[in-house]
Image (tube, rainbow, N blue to C red):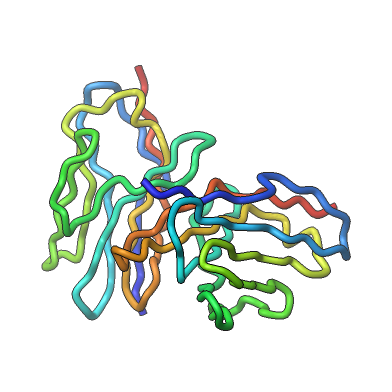
Amino acid sequence: GAVVSQHPSWVICKSGTSVKIECRSLDFQATTMFWYRQFPKQSLMLMATSNEGSKATYEQGVEKDKFLINHASLTLSTLTVTSAHPEDSSFYICSARDPGIFYEQYFGPGTRLTVT
Amino acid sequence: AQRVTQPEKLLSVFKGAPVELKCNYSYSGSPELFWYVQYSRQRLQLLLRHISRESIKGFTADLNKGETSFHLKKPFAQEEDSAMYYCALYAGNMLTFGGGTRLMVKP
């Protein structure tokens, strides 16, 4: 099946700094990618939908100026957490939509962000 | 708006016992429903989709539109089935996940 990678898998940063997380579809082109946030022992919450070549669509309550999403190519989407604070510490997961099956999504392994 | 509810956060059974993980949804249109599984330290992966009416790793799920349910079942649980299970609804161009159920299969 299709593979989605994320980098880094784990990052620790100081409060006030910015962190960029990459999401790549390795063997298929993804016009649409999704970014989720998962708190410990909780479910995935969709943050935003990223469409190649256009602006991301953010879910209600997600600050678009804080969580910058760029989807510049068909295989790469990035999430930048700007001016990170300890409450931004979480597990961030991306997924990419299979272009052949509109509802099929493949998930990355996730990135654990810890803000100190 | 769509909503997915998994009433049990934790389900603990003995090996060989039947398993049923409950999922209820609310959606005004025709639902596309899925079960995803997340094994320890692994990524989320699709287990099965209602549209395929398939059985994966012995698991089945039937969509009951009258009860708005999509419960996941397996007649004989195995220890390797221990994982987090998420029910998800595809609608409005996005997946909405339930809260998840942790299944623990004891030897």
Frontmost residue, A3 versus B38: A3
Frontmost residue, B106 versus A96: A96
Q: Quadrant of the N terminus of chain A?
A: top left
In this picture, residue A93 sits left or right of residue A102: right
| Residue B11, percent from left and from top | 36, 38
In this picture, residue B79 sits left or right of residue A3: left
Location of residue B65 with respect to B38 vertically, above or below: below
| Residue B14, percent from left and from top | 30, 23
Location of residue B59 with respect to B32 vertically, above or below: above
Q: Residue at x 22, y 51 (%)?
A: B71
Q: How many marks?
A: 0
Residue A100: quadrant of the picture: bottom left
Q: Residue at x 50, y 56 (%)?
A: A25
In this picture, residue B38 sits left or right of residue B65: right
Frontmost residue, A109 versus A2: A2
| Residue B23, percent from left and from top | 28, 56
Residue A48: quadrant of the picture: bottom right
Q: Residue at x 20, y 27 (%)?
A: B76
Q: Residue at x 66, y 65 (%)?
A: A79
Location of residue B74 with respect to A86 vertically, above or below: above
| Residue A56, percent from left and from top | 57, 79
Frontmost residue, A76 versus B68: A76
